[in-house]
Image (cartoon, rainbow, N blue to C red):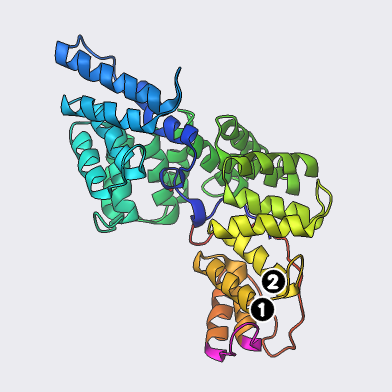
Amino acid sequence: MLENEYTDYEHMEFISLAKRKIVCYNYFNYKRCIMAKEPTLSPTEFLAKKYFDIGEKAFTGDGCPVDFGKAAANFAQSAKLGYVPAIYSLGVCYLRGFGVKPDPKRAYELVKQAADEGSLDAQFTLGHFYFDGSGVVEQDYEKAVEIFTMSAEQGHPGGMNDLGFCYQRGLGVERDDEKAFEYFSAAAEADFPAALNNVGDCYSFGRGVERDPKAAFSYYSRAAHLGYATAMNNIGMCYLNGNGVAVDYKLAVEWFKRAADLGNAVAVANLGFCYETGRGVDSDIKEAVRLYTISADAECPSGQYNLAKCYRDGAGVAENRERAFSLYRRSAEHGFAMAYVDLALCYSQGVGVAPDPELAAKYKALAEESGYRVPDLSAEEKPKKTTTAKKPSSKKNK
């Protein structure tokens, strides 16, 4: 099973941040684009900005080694002097544990303070506190949409992108694929990587716009060259399936490796599939299992699903039906529709779990609602190999 990243597994750019370079791009570079030219600074403002600049250089490794502790300390000094970008950046440090112990409550207080002072980045981030329901505030999609809208109306590409996501999924607003495409496109004009990728998804799946695989590939390429791992994975999918470009398994593997090197768990699973099936690389089931395991441990549903198949069939690993069932269930909890099919079979035939006709019927219904056909549940079980789906389910999937 292969997976494009058009899923809830990794939805908005903000919560999928794992690599420092992407963090730096989102949290700092947009301020340079959005903030108006600063007026003449007072001595206090000048000192505050100096502290902030030192912190930013330490955070990004601009001309010096990366030092999150130094970055957080300088942001704190600048924040004490009331410098809004530093207040926000210190909030990010507390949110993600950069140079300080993670403290979501303190992060929320700082981000909200900066947002109230007019920081567009802070407003964008504040929206995510409500979108995610991080425990500091209750999950409130309508409140998140309100904040994303405010951010988008002031030209913040992250706000535009995430507002588009809300319209696409009907979260806090009535679902509207065309409006989602409009917001994604507006953010893409600012070269916001997640938005470029999302426009590519719209063209790839024909959501809010006529399907155009070549346009999808073009947008994925723009995002990938900005270092966005999700788009790198999607380029690999394009080369693997011949969407918008000629099939080229070796290039598919190359792009999956690039994304995997950036920690993208979906690409790790897709790379495992290439090793399992010998596409673009020599077939190596043990390497496939190793990659599926890494992906599954990162809570990637396609990695969990493919690893479950290996345990079920004893492919590259000792057969273990109970382990297979556990992995199917974890994959299904992420909304991975193909796992519904196998869970229905497991509960029907007692594979790795005690038979349960009611649960078998439940997962059969979920699978069919997602467009998948479940074999006759009364049929004798037959071992199955890991399968490939050119387009995964886009159900529950920023």
Q: Amino acid at mark 1?
A: Arg
Q: Is residue 25 above or below residue 339?
A: above
Write down the residue under mark 2. Answer: 311
Location of residue 385 in the rendering, given as x and y in whole percent from the top left corner: 76, 69
Q: Quadrant of residue 73?
A: top left
Q: Is residue 287 left or right of residue 159?
A: right
Res. 219 mark: none
Q: Amino acid at mark 2?
A: Tyr
Say which element carries label 1. Answer: helix
Q: Which residue lies at the image location 56% right of the left edge and 59% below the top edge?
A: 297
Q: Nearer the viewer, residue 99 or 255?
A: 99
Q: Nearer the viewer, residue 179 or 351?
A: 351
Q: Which residue lies at the image location 55% right of the left edge and 73% below the top edge?
A: 329
Q: Which residue lies at the image location 75% right of the left edge and 39% below the top edge?
A: 251
Location of residue 40 in the rendering, given as x and y in whole percent from the top left corner: 20, 9
Location of residue 383 in the rendering, given as x and y in whole percent from the top left corner: 76, 77
Say which element carries label 2. Answer: helix
Circle 2/circle 1 CB separation < 8 Å: yes
Q: Is residue 7 above or below residue 322?
A: above
* Magenta residues, dominant SS class: loop
Q: Is residue 357 above or below residue 124?
A: below
Write down the residue under mark 1. Answer: 321
